[in-house]
Amino acid sequence: MLDASAALAFFLQTASPNIFAPASVPADEIYHLALFVIGITIGIFVVVGGLLVFAVIKFRRRKDDNGREPPQVYGSTQIELAWTVLPALIVFVLFLTTARVIHQIEDAKAPAGALQVTVVGHQFWWEFRYPQYGVVTANEIHVPVNSPTFLTLLSADTDHAFWVPQLAGKTDLIPNRVNHTWIEPSRAGVYLGQCALFCGVQHAHMLLRVKVQSRADFDAWIRRQQQPAVKDPAVAAGRQVFQTTACVNCHTVRGTIADGRFGPDLTHLMSRATLGAGVLANSPENLRLWIQNPAAFKPGCEMPAMSLNPKQLGELVAYLETLK
Amino acid sequence: MVSQSLPHAGPHAGAIEDRRLGGAGWLEWVHEWVVTVDHKKIGLMYIVYALIFLAIGGAEATIMRIQLAFPESHFVSPQVFNELFTMHGTTMVFFMGMPILFGFANYLVPLMIGARDMAFPRLNAFSFWMTAFGGLLLYFSFIGGSGVYGAGSAPNVGWWAYAPLTAKAFSRGHSTDYWTLALLLSGIGSIGAGLNLVVTIFCMRCRGMTLAKMPMLVWLNLVMGGMVLGGIGPLTASQLMLCVDRYLGGHFFDTQAGGSAIMWFHFFWIFGHPEVYILVIPAFAFASEIIPVFSRKAIFGYPVMVAATLAIAFLSFSVWAHHMFATGMPSYGNAFFVLTSMVIGVPTGIKIFNWLGTMWGGKLIFSTAMLFCIGFLFQFLVGGLTGIMLATAPFDWQLNDSYFVVGHFHYMLVGAIIFTVFAAFYYWYPKFTGRMMDERLGKWHFWLMLIGFHMTFDPMHITGILGMPRRIYTYEPGRGWAIWNLIITIGVFIQIVAVGIFVWNLIRSYFRGKLAGNDPWDAWTLEWATSSPPPPYNFAVEPAVQSRRPLWDLKHPDDPDWKYE
């Protein structure tokens, strides 16, 4: 019995993707707006809730009640006016504050030279393209720290939403529509998110991993990703299996005949931490099980069981292992 | 001025001993209910029908909560989970929420305006049966016969059914069609019911009852009926367009052929947000009748309450895109919907303040009905405030589609609407049946419901803040979500016990409850002037009223309301 969940939990040891632990400029701006709004609403709650509790205690019918009806009061124009104008003023302040933050986040212009990443939502995984560098990867996005990254959001099929709570609020990926969002992380580390808009049967397994790195580490990662796939003669048999089965219809391995576009680019598969958009940790054993029957881990996913014999499977996994 | 003449039930008032279920006449009994056009019988059928769907929708929620109690659980498959949340949402909104509120409105509005029936009794029956048929059609998808392709698989696209997930390419078979046709049919029923309410209230009021002398419940249901006429249309239109897309080669929402998914979002929410108020305004109606009676005071600021309701109804048609802050609308578009969504908080706040003003200086009687109303006030306040947070577009970019939203709208749908519906049961059950509900069981029901409710829906706000999206069938351990999800699931079981006590109370009181008499609460509106249950013709003579509280005037001839109104 494979303890996939324990392995994954070990692998993903991270705290909650808490929206109140922001680590990026837009998330931080939202955080401060949220504190302001929460402060005001707690104030209203204390006043109104307090009055309610007071009324319930003070005006309860006592045991020694004389049985007469209380004085009938039908209303008061002054009081009505007061509790109309006061909330209206609060709304006015809240609206202006909110409008400013909307403008700051949504109308921010990408500075020259900012990293551009195109995110394509698929059922049920993420495709990331770096047009400035010619790099394509999946499910795990690398960005430099203390530098803005502007994301263009597209969908290949249904609606999805890009949400990494500590980095930015969510933005939908909608077919036939180009959306934008941006992040500017302030701390290195791995930030988790996932698809936030119901997109079909495996909506739950569209994990997003954002790896925020120093500029030097990021550049090194980009250079490795720009390389075509490793050609290791030791795994020629596995490459042969890959190139002669249905794998190539959906997957790309740059530098080979495999140029499918439906599934994740596998050129540097082993540089990624998970399989199946976060459903398994990326280990040789898990890779073998995944290829054997993806539906065992992610029922409803688009990748079919490949029905390879054990020898082919071993060769194929050995080949994929070299795609570092 | 019309002089007051108060009605009575007349010599043929339905004595409660006459009600018998079994015996040789059962077929006649069934026939009588099926062919009835009596607003009271139709009202009760709506209510019983809605209670059945409450149980079904509750069972679906329970299965989901068992699945989510622990991370990486395999209690149900992802396919089944997606069907469950789709059916739960659709059922609770269309086949539980609206019918139960229509049921109370049907029963109470004619009585409260001194009429003998609705304006269109047969349209009334037609509306009920259309709604009923819609619900059955939806559930036929679950149990559907073999041999009917696609039946046996319930809709699984979520209750918003966002395009293009409903397109043929992504939703094969007929599950989406069941959803579409069920909502089309029940939508026709809803429009009929809304129309009937509006016409009844405008045309059937008794002598002396000007618009300004209607009980608050009647005002609120008038507004609700009007909103149904405006709100259901876009839903019906979009369902027709979806049918055209799926079967006649249309491309309204079919993105693969150049259609627009965003257009579905707009159509759905321009129905969907008014719908929220269609559900909550009748809840306000219950609170606006029950709180005054158990505070022993007239409603505070009646004209302002009416004005606030109209303002809410009007504004509710201008806030829909706050469900779409994350869809990439331009900043000025987002700002507009921030403004309208926040402005609607002002009349909503006015309503809370006026209920508080009604209680202020009164002599509060903590009957079960009143306890549920106080619970409603508290939860509606909290739900309103989390609503303000969600109206703040940038904050909404974080909270939208997370469990925070699930917590927020269940505060409204359960904490506000269901709580007042329970209050309405305890308050009007004596009128419906002639017998009182048991107050001791009622207190158990209230306190367990309150505890269960808060255990269930409070932690959802926390998991949302911790980044848990809604509609996921499972989640990894180690994200800090597990403990809260377990608490939520335990809360659900407490609510089940509470509702079980309630149902037992309903059944037991029907046979064994204390006899109620005409006016057990010493209340002030016309329904308490006739017998319990009222005879088929409601009143032997047409009543005439002089104020909003005709029975107060009768009981206090030295200090009648009409002197002050």
Image: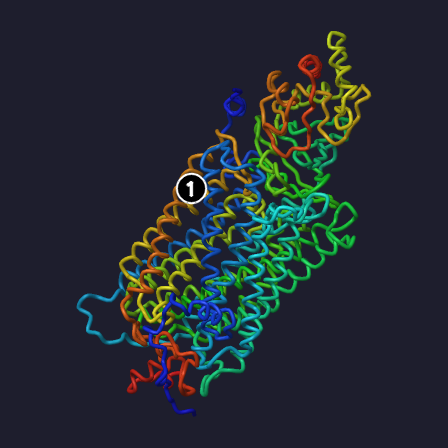
Q: How many marks?
A: 1
- Chain letter of disc 1 in the image: B
Q: Quadrant of residue B557?
A: bottom left
Q: Which residue is mark 1?
A: B489
Residue B344: x and y, percent? 53, 62
Q: Which of these two is toward me, A128 or A29?
A: A128
Residue closest to the far front: B24
Check disc 1: other Cα within 10 Å, few if <14, some if 14-19, many if 20+: many
Residue closest to the far right: A257
Q: Which of these two is toward me, B339 or B154?
A: B154
Q: Which of these two is toward me, B203 or B317?
A: B203
Left/right of residue B544 with respect to residue A122 in the rendered view: left
Residue B312: x and y, percent? 53, 66
Residue B203: x and y, percent? 53, 82
Q: Give the residue type that dot 1 points to.
A: Thr
- Please name the residue shown 50% across and 54% down the image: B387
Q: Is A216 located above or below residue B458 in the figure? A: above
Q: Does dot 1 land on a helix, a strand or a loop?
A: helix
Image quarter where the C terminus of chain B lies is bottom left
Residue B158: x and y, percent? 59, 48
